Amino acid sequence: MKRNFKKAVSLALASTMALSLAACGGTSASTDTTAAGKAEGGDSAASNEEVTLKFSWWGGDARHEATEKAIAAFMEKYPNIKVEAEYGAWTGWEEKQALAIQGGNAADVMQINWNWITSYSGNGKNFVNLDEYSDVIDLTQFDQEVLDQCKADGKLMAVPISLTGRLFYWNKTTFDEIGCELPTDEASLLAAGEAFKAYGDDYYPLALGEYDRAIFLVYYLESKYGKAWVENNECQYTEEEVVDGLNFIKSLEDNHVIPTRPTMIAAGFDSIDKSQEWIDGKYAGIFEWDSSANKYQSALADNSGFTVGEEIKFGDKANGGFSKVSMGMAITSSCQHPVEAAALIDFLWNGEGAAIMGSECGIPASTAGLAAAQAADAVKPLVLEANTKVLAFVDMPLDPYFESSKLKDTTDGVYTDVFDGFSYGDYDAEEAADAPLPTGKSGACPD
């Protein structure tokens, strides 16, 4: 049944803001290991006080293994500090952690998505201000501009783990088999669709989920029109320009560049890397975060041709797309031992732990952490190549509200509603653009 887009956008944004407001209460650390106590007593992480910290993160098996090894090394260095781990896959993770933050019983140290700062601590109260622990965490190892992206209400809510951006990965084995060049512009992308269709109806040069399509639409528009999607919480695009972007996405389906959403839904997978089509090489390309490279490569039955592609140019006005803080490390305001928690963060990203973590959370944003990881030969060349390439290319800022879970939800989020409805033919481009992708505090793009 056709949904009212304006209503869908309004409800999604209202839910996002309500969740943010509900998380605004915050609780503060209640022991004497606060900044004041620390200043008087020094780094108590090296003391004999028995302390237990809870540490939560999400990821795949390789990240879990590396993090557990790094935690073990930390506890060996600080035998008085016990770290209890809580981890899992991404699906459902944010919802679980959001409830824990609101309830004041979240883990002491949390791996967070960058947009969680805006969503759950926009007033600077639900995470500890890490500027107060700069004698425990060496903040000089991080670029100040990147640290500023992790602030709310002037307070440093997290340490940036890594920076990331979206780029293209291709299964060159399939492209070579079909006799097709890797796409570098719109014409070669459409030509690839024609070549793949001639080879087999179930072969596609690129596969995009709902959220991937939202990002790719913005990438296309920013490239063509030379302006950011959002600036100062205001969308910069007219309805006519968004219609142009939606028609571009539709052209990718019509020209067999990407499978339709009904085709992907019928296949029954919850992520592209788990699809048999990707595993067998029938889906021969993705548009993904640089930090996800190894997940997609390792899923292939034959991964010898997995290649980092060039960014595709759509016009000459700008390089579309954006980089962002991939993840951060935060201390929740309910933490009873923030000094020890800060010592754990410094160990993992500036100290010995960085050599163990390597590039499992992306290329380290810490200068010292990256040096330690490279010295230990723990940085995966594919991830480094992708990260270097995308950060050198992208121009535009990312609106943190773009990644709200209420908008990305695969069941009833706005991105799913827009792109599934559009692909199924429930809406045309004009109807979809009537209330397009939500943006920041200001809501949708202007009519």
Image: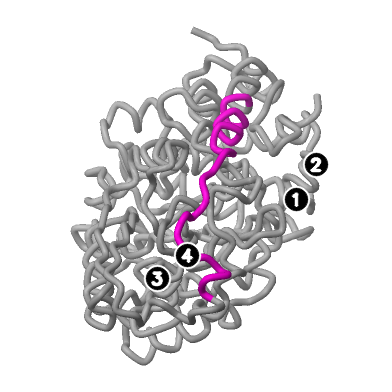
N-term-proximal mark, 4 vs 1 = 4
- Which callout, 3 or 2, points at the residue further toward the start of the chain? 2
Q: Which residue in the structure is indicated by mark 3?
A: 340
Report the amino acid beneath label 3.
Glu
Q: Quadrant of the C terminus?
A: top right
Q: CA distance from mark 4 to mark 1?
A: 46 Å
Q: Earlier in the sequence, mark 3 or mark 4?
A: 4
Callout in the foreground (3, 1)? 3
Q: From this viewpoint, which residue is outermost toward the left?
A: 301
Q: Amino acid at mark 4?
A: Asp
Contact, CB < 8 Å: mark 1 with mark 2?
yes
Residue 116 percent across, percent down from the top left: 53, 47
Front one among 260 and 288: 288
Q: Residue at x 41, y 50 (%)?
A: 205
Kindly identify which residue carries mark 4: 32
Q: Residues within 10 Å of mark 3 (few under 14, many from 20)?
A: many
Name the residue tied to disc 2: 236
What segment carries the magenta color?
Answer: 14-38
Q: Is residue 312 above or below residue 377?
A: above
- Asked if marks 3 and 2 touch (Cβ < 8 Å), the reply is no
Mark 2 element type: loop
Residue 128, can we see it?
yes
**Which of the labelled discs sits on residue 228, or is there none?**
1
Q: Is residue 70 above or below residue 105?
A: below
